[in-house]
Amino acid sequence: MSATSEILKAPEFESIEQAVKAGIAPQPVAAAFNELTALRQELKKLGEPESYYLKAMNCPHHHRIFAAEPRSYRDLPLRLAEYGTCYRYEQSGELFGLMRVRSLNMNDAHIYCTPEQFAAEFNAVNEMYLKYFKIFGIEKYIMRFSTHDPSRLTGDNAKFVNEPELWKQTEDLVRKVLIDSKIPYVEVPNEAAFYGPKIDVQVWSVIGREFTLATNQVDFAVPRRFGLVYRDKDNTDKTPLCIHRAPLGTHERFIGFIIEHYAGNFPLWLAPEQVRVMTLGDDEKLVAYAKGIVAELRGNFVRCESDFRTDPIKAKIAGAEEAKVHTMLVIGGRDMDAGNVSVRLHGKGNIGAKPKGEAIADILSAIKERRA
């Protein structure tokens, strides 16, 4: 067990609610804690400050990491991944629920490799996407292969980096990977990124709506601009190819997609609230018994909530059904005396009473096996 796992299994995790905050705060919030005043005073001591910007993308920062020390062909492929937040000031008219936001979370990565390594690395990214599709039950998908327009490499209408040989080389490499791996794709001219060809992964939800879920891009231009080099076998410096990949795109957009895909009826392993423990009344011993079950589930990383109010149990169940909670554990006095829980599943009703240990084991097993 890793140190992180041991920390997360500490007793505090059983009773804590995790929170996520924005990376920035509006002026009134910061001023309320005198942060701005103190910060300005510290900055004055340093003289004229440099200009800093909110991070719009991870690419330049990863390039700086690559350039921080000498690299050899033996160091490649170098894969830098970051689960982090980026910020982009989308216009108010472009904001659209979870599908387009200003604070973006993603598992972004940049893979630096030699031309000889490219095919294997690019294919590995595509295979990872296919693995995710299987996990999330995405059956209809296609790779949208975007290429450049040779007429737009120069002149006032230029859209792409003027490197015709590299465009041909990288597009041929991507095309070969797609053909050899038998992945369904369509080729779309004049839609590449300015720095290289790309693949946008198009998926369809169960109601037939199309989404761009992920991207897999080749970059042969920006690493050169950043002066990124590695020492090759012939003792010369060469610029690596860079693969940009974001397996699930921005997680906000992905969550929006799977909400529609499952119509909110998530399988247990994926449900935001996996289990809700409810009591028939608020008897002190009964609540203590129920709290022990909640603590055990949370201690095993189950997203479990509780409802110990004095409301009628029918109202509690109706509330859980409306919230589409996957599994409900209903506990009365007789359940407690027998060491049992009564199990209900969303949309399926009462499953019956089970020993507490057996019910918890079933939940943990279903989550581990990602049962539908």
Image: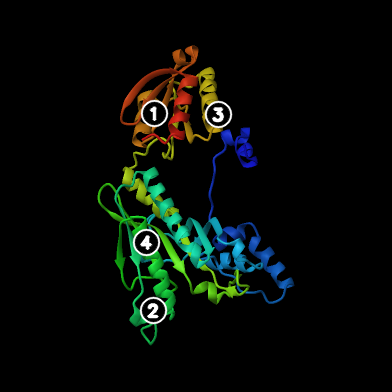
Q: Secondary structure at mark 1?
A: helix
Q: Residue at x 57, y 62 (%)?
A: 76
Badge nearest the viewer, 2 or 1: 2
Q: Secondary structure at mark 3?
A: helix
Query: For mark 3, what is the residue?
Result: 295
Query: For mark 4, what is the residue?
Result: 200
Which of disc 1 and disc 2 is earlier in sequence? 2
**Residue 313, how many percent across, how many down?**
38, 24
Res 142 quadrant in image:
bottom left
Amino acid type at circle 3 is: Ala
Extreme residue toward the bottom, this view: 155
The circle drawn on residue 316 is 1
Which of disc 2 and disc 3 is earlier in sequence? 2
Amino acid type at circle 4 is: Asp
Taking depth in this image into account, of 247 and 72 the one nearest to the observer is 72
Which of disc 4 and disc 3 is earlier in sequence? 4
Give the CA distance from mark 2 to mark 4.
Answer: 19 Å
Q: Residue at x 39, y 64 (%)?
A: 174
